[in-house]
Amino acid sequence: MPMREGIYGLLAEFDTPGDLIRAAKQARLDGWRRLDCYTPYPVEEAAEAIGVTFLMHGGPATIYGARAYDAFCEFADAQADQ
């Protein structure tokens, strides 16, 4: 795999769920697309903030845990194909 130039990844810690959500939304607005959020408890807005949404039985469902990154990659690839 060839070396990539520039920023490859970033890790941040936030004091409140609100701070995490604001930062995630701003990262999306700034053009970052492969994002993930890890919290010690579910923060429902986190998936939406990073652009992961699924429709199940007519309503949104949030994906947590190990599947979240794979789900986001599937979503990002689908968006790129449109």
Image: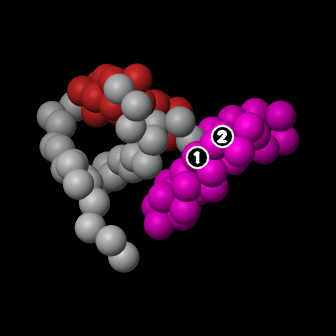
Residue 72 placement (x, y as % from top left): 54, 51
Of all residues, the one furthest to the right in this rendering is 57
Residues in magenta? 53-82
Q: How crowded is mark 2: few (under 14 residues within 10 Å), some or many (20 or more)?
A: few
Q: Do the residues labelled 2 and 1 touch (CB within 8 Å)?
A: yes
Viewer-proximal residue among 50 and 64: 50
Residue 78 makes an appearance in the image: yes
Q: In this view, does 76 lie above or below 71?
A: above
Amino acid type, callout 1: Ala
On whether residue 4 falls in the magenta region, the answer is no
At horizontal 83% and vertical 34% (from top left) the residue drawn is 58
Q: Pointer 1: what residue?
A: 76
Residue 25 placement (x, y as % from top left): 39, 26
Q: Pointer 2: what residue?
A: 79
48 with respect to 18 (left or right): right
Count every numbered label the image shows and give the total: 2
Q: In this view, does 4 lie above or below 25?
A: below
Per the rendering, the mark at residue 54 is: none
